[in-house]
Amino acid sequence: MIIIFFGPPGAGKGTQASLTAKTLKIPHLSTGDILRDKLLDQDTLSIKLKKLMDSGNLVSDDILNEIIANRLKLPDCQGGFVLDGYPRTMSQKIFLIDFLESHDLSISKIIDLVIDEKIIIHRIKSRSNIENRLDDREEIIKTRMVKYIEETKPLFKYFRSKYPNDYHIIDGDQDIEKIQDDILKIVKNEDFQP
Ligand code: ADP
């Protein structure tokens, strides 16, 4: 099973993607986590990445596409995977679709978590106190929201028209358990009533 999660920063995408992957026993590929891991290397590349991420800007498509291509080729992805944070731009979308087509793979479900911007700002502010992520400061959240609206939202039209029966919008302003329940119904093809 191949599942893609979409959702603005703070929508709970990472939490839901991780729970879903655990239940389905497939890897959870979070590009945010993979990039944060890379920062630990402390080389020239990681200094560049840190600057971009801390300011709320996106890392270059070439870097992301390479990370994803290398990751998807590993044996643990052969039974499916959950994508969280990728694709985020048009170029990443094109790269992913090409990759999947050339490996005879297709997307099973797309989960689009939707949530009001005011709730997001409130949530991220409390997360930043706990996790101390520099990119969770309020002015940076705004940049990340703008990036999401400008770069990622335009991809939805493509996915909605290509996968009309497998593109699902989920209300992100519910308890974690309820959201996960909704998602599992969808991935298990059970009756889902929003
Ligand atoms: P969130 O979903 O809360 O915005 P993530 O943890 O997914 O945060 O990502 C953190 C940062 O990592 C992003 O703001 C961006 O700088 C970088 N990043 C993650 N995924 C991508 C991607 N697919 N393309 C470009 N940059 C990315």
Image: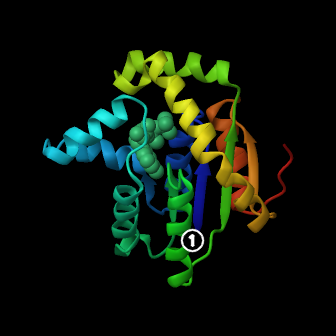
Answer few, some or many: residues within 10 Å of disc 1's Cα (few below 14, many 20 plus, some between 14 and 19).
some
Between 24 and 149, which is closer to the camera in this rendering?
A: 149
Residue at 41% across, 69% down:
72
Image colouring: rainbow
Q: Which residue is mark 1?
A: 97
Q: Quadrant of residue 109?
A: bottom right
Q: Is mark 1 within 8 Å of ligand 1?
A: no
> Residue 32: x and y, percent?
40, 44
Q: Quadrant of the C terminus?
A: top right
Tell me, yes or no, if residue 163 can be seen here: no
Q: In the picture shown, does residue 13 fall above or below 5?
A: above
> Residue 22: x and y, percent?
49, 54
> Residue 86: x and y, percent?
50, 54
Q: Amino acid at mark 1?
A: Ile
| Count of numbered badges drawn on the protein | 1
> Is residue 124 shown left or right of residue 191?
left
Q: Residue furthest left?
A: 43
Residue at 75% across, 52% down:
168
> Is residue 131 shown left or right of residue 11?
left
Residue at 30% across, 41% down:
36
**Ligand 1 shown in quarter:** top left
Between 184 and 166, which is closer to the camera in this rendering?
A: 166
Tell me, yes or no, if residue 62 can be seen here: yes
Q: Quadrant of residue 51?
A: top left
Q: Quadrant of the N terminus?
A: bottom right
> Residue 155: x and y, percent?
65, 54
Q: In the picture shown, does residue 22 fall above or below 39?
A: below
Residue at 75% across, 46% down:
169
Between 162 and 126, which is closer to the camera in this rendering?
A: 162
Secondary structure of residue under mark 1: helix
